[in-house]
Image (tube, rainbow, N blue to C red):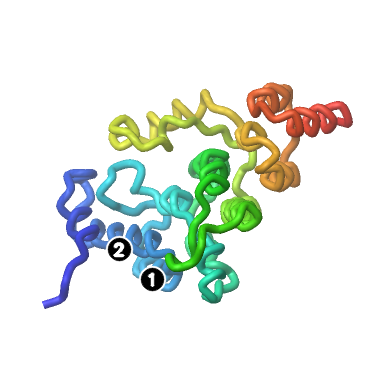
Amino acid sequence: MARVSFSRLKAMMEPWYPEIQGEERERQVELHNAVQKLDKDEVQSCLDKGTDPDRCLGGEGWKSNNPIRLLNRKFYRTYGRLKRGEEISDPAPDVATLQALVEGGADINREPYVWQRVFLWNKTDTDNILKQPIRAHYDIPKPTQEEAEAEAVSYIKDANRILEALLRAGANPDKLGHPVPYTPSEESNFITDEEAAVFFAQGTRPINEAIKKGMVWESQVDLLLQYTKLDEASLEAARESNDPGMVDKITKLWNEM
């Protein structure tokens, strides 16, 4: 008898979306699991069976019912893998999975995916890496500050990899986003697409969320500026960063516009 994974069993039994039943529910659960594993071949198999590329089903309600939203919550870190001598495919598994979804008909502008990616992976993450970098192996000494800084740079590149793939696929760089739908909580679990849209309409632009993260994330700001422009709120975002370097950068760019 074939074993059924706990995540699949949970998703099939949870009361989320009772209107989705039978084979359709099974297909959406399969797509959720394929995206979770960043397995582009399994994603493609799901799409070939007729699964909606904009719908999947996990055991977390709203936050796990959209494939690209779910993918944005994943983070494929390359630093430790490369340290261990692993090879990274080209494209990397996260980008390949996104490409499969987009080529399969997923709506790249269904939600503010660019904003979500910028918001979820942020300065708190890089600050933590600089304080407590990972060990490639447990039997080696604690990494040096230089190695910690290299890991932080790698982390930002990993975050930007999907961001760039979204932008290249045509995701709107200015679509407003809001923290509430994308912050894990009981409220976000029970939210609906319509309710999330109300929050998004009151939201901020991705470029300004990136600016708030300061100069450590300068490469992300520069990436977004290839697709969009600053606005007056960008000056306030620079001040919110509490980073003199970012304030100087954005002020100079604003004055040059």
Disc number at residue 42?
A: 1
Which residue appears farthest toward the front when viewing the image? 141
116 or 243, which is in the foreground?
A: 243
Residue 253 pos. (x, y %): 83, 33
Residue 225 pos. (x, y %): 74, 42
Helix, strand or loop for disc 2: helix
Instruction: Look at 85% across and 30% down and name the residue there.
Output: 252
Q: Residues within 10 Å of mark 2 (few under 14, many from 20)?
A: many
Instruction: Look at 15% across and 76% down and name the residue there.
Output: 2
Image-based side of 78 in relation to 49, left or right: right
Q: Quadrant of residue 30?
A: bottom left
Residue 72 pos. (x, y %): 48, 50
Residue 257 pos. (x, y %): 86, 30
Callout 1, which amino acid?
A: Glu
Q: Quadrant of residue 215?
A: top right
Q: Are marks 2 and 1 in contact (CB under 8 Å)?
A: yes
Helix, strand or loop for disc 1: helix
**For residue 14, above or below residue 193:** below
131 or 38, which is in the foreground?
A: 131
**For residue 41, above or below residue 228:** below
Q: Residues within 10 Å of mark 1 (few under 14, many from 20)?
A: some
**For residue 159, above or below residue 245:** below
Disc number at residue 140?
A: none
Image-based side of 188 in relation to 19, left or right: right
Which residue appears farthest toward the left when viewing the image? 1
**For residue 66, above or below residue 174:** below
Which residue appears farthest toward the right when viewing the image? 256
Q: Which residue is mark 2?
A: 30
Instruction: Look at 43% across and 65% down and name the residue there.
Output: 138
Callout 2, which amino acid?
A: Glu
